[in-house]
Image (cartoon, rainbow, N blue to C red):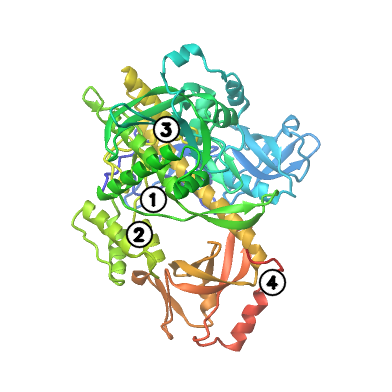
Amino acid sequence: MTHKKQSPKKSSQVNIVKGRLDISRSGMGYVIVEGMEKDIIIRPNDFNRALHGDIVRVQVAKGVNAGRRVEGIITDVAERKQTEFVGNIQVNKNFAFFEPATEKPIPDFFIAPDKLNGAKDKDRVLVKMIRWDKGDKKPQGEVVSVLKAEDENDMAMKEILIESGFSLAFDKEVLAETDQLSTSISREEAKKRKDFRDILTFTIDPVDAKDFDDAISIRNLDNGNYEIGVHIADVSHFVKPGTALDKSAYERATSVYLPDRVNPMLPEKISNELCSLRPHEDKYTFSAVFQINNRAEVKHSWIGRTIIHSNHRFTYDEVQDIIDQHDGLHHKPLMLLNDLAQKFRRERFRNGAINFSSQEVRFQLDEKGKPIGIVVKESKDAHKLIEEFMLLANRTVATYISKIKINKEPIPFPYRIHDTPDDEKLKPFVAFAKKFGYTFNMHDEAAVAASFNKLLKEVQGKPEQHVLEQLGIRTMSKAIYTSTNIGHYGLGFEHYCHFTSPIRRYPDVMVHRILQECLEKHLKMDKKMEEKCKHCSDRERKAMEAERAGNKYKQVEFMQNYLGETFEGIISGVASFGFFVETVTHKCEGMVTVRDLSEYDDFRLDEADYALVGLRTKQKFRMGDAVTIQVVAANLSKRQLDYAWVPTKQMAKPAASGKQARSAVIPKKKTAKKK
């Protein structure tokens, strides 16, 4: 689906525009303005205290000749991308300077003696910018913490978060507001809510979870149906608009999950205590409650604020054991919920949802955060049980809101939308799938979805499964938040939103607030809704980038134990400069470069076949192919793994000189055993 570009927003002066500053390594700046075909050039002397990634206002030079690049001058910074930086400090007698460790040009910070926080000369530190006044050449900062050199892992994870623009700690004002929040359940507030405390309720979460967003209640009704409640932590009861706590949550917009830590959106008192639906405690919740019959048909639904008391905290593994064995604590309601979830799932796919599945890895860490093993996480029936009921709640809330109008206009609301596949990506994929005998019906969107599901079912267990699944996912658009509802293509839903995780996602908090306004009939038109949606989508993307960087760091750290060893792998991507390989055992991805392959042949990229092809031998490395690789380098600072291709016996051996040259760069094998 094609969406029109919006024209750039202008102030009362027509030559002022707003956009994001991108500074190149050379120091030249470019402001990217939505709707403008070309970026605006900003010379270093015209940055006006703006840094890379900041949202800025730019005065565009008038009278630019046609064909020339537009130049401008930054008038002010509308929004800082980053206020905390990692680097080294130089301490003198009466003052100190901080040098940020970044690829982008950033001036040194001036640090006053009373802002050193114990930092000494040449320490690696985290510094926060506290002010940068007009006329000052350098910003002023204060040391937040000293990063200990011996704790390399902790420093690396913190730097990943900071690079992505996420604060490591909450401001004092935010923590002070949090401390004022009452932990007790008031009788007055409880009276305003539907009481579910006497109904069987439990949570199902990962074994290491501390913040329990959601709970499920279940009971039999006299009419033969089941009442099933999806109860969500009522974060909006505690986090009020306009507070420092709310501003902080909005700026972060999401929790970030790294291999050894969570950087939370909300302080721990809220995420792990006040709002966590812990067992044997009364909790405020926002709920979607359903009457459902044996055929998984929803006969009635109700949405509103509630109070619950969780009877038990299950882990996914515990519930999976109960499902497998048909026995255990609360096994009858769990078996019923599982049966209904399976029916919901089948119906979803019949109605056009696409059955993509992806593997996730979890690192087993020692007490110092070092990876000692990697486990592939499987999505089992216990996970799907929770997933289906969360989808039902999200869809129900979005459908309810979609029907409400203010002056015949839709109420501004953060829908979660997923556009149809991009034709430019879909067509080459369809042509590639055809080489394996899989055909696509391109008649309409529903036909494409049905073709995807047919392929995903038929490809199971075949050699081409991995490549077609991965390439199929890459044809898909990215899901985003927006007030313009076009539905969710991947789920096959006309209306969808995020309602079920307000502890870790700010859009869910916005959904709760708007939902309560609708229930109370105190409707408001939030004219900044689309801006808020874009911000939340941007922060979500940054969080995902940080999570990928954290996982990559751990992969490299883990594979340092296996330098010189060989592994079976699958080619996970190809480019003109080489191919990526993911090891079968550990799911660790590294690169085999064209340069290293040059001793065998001169390889060129065949984009249509997702392959590198040798000009002389016609040797082909295609995405999805099984290969053997040797680990030759593991660079933690670059978060990069380098592999060498190991030919099979049937293939022609390389020249002796080439083989000797390669062995010279392979580090000596360590004694660590394979995991």
Return the disc, 1 or 2, that comes first in the chain's sequence: 1
Return the disc, 2 or 4, that comes first in the chain's sequence: 2
Question: CB atoms at circles 3 and 1 under 8 Å apart?
Answer: no
Quadrant containing the C terminus in the rendered view: bottom right
Residue type pointed to by label 1: Arg
Residue 669 shows which numbered tag? 4
Residue wearing tag 3: 508
Residue 103 image position (x, y, % from top left): 58, 52
Q: CA distance from mark 3 to mark 1?
A: 42 Å
Residue 472 shows which numbered tag? 2
Q: CA distance from mark 1 to mark 2?
A: 38 Å
275 and 63: which is toward the camera: 275
Q: CA distance from mark 4 to mark 3?
A: 50 Å
Q: Secondary structure at mark 4?
A: loop
Residue drawn at point x = 58 percent, y = 41 percent: 262
Residue wearing tag 1: 69
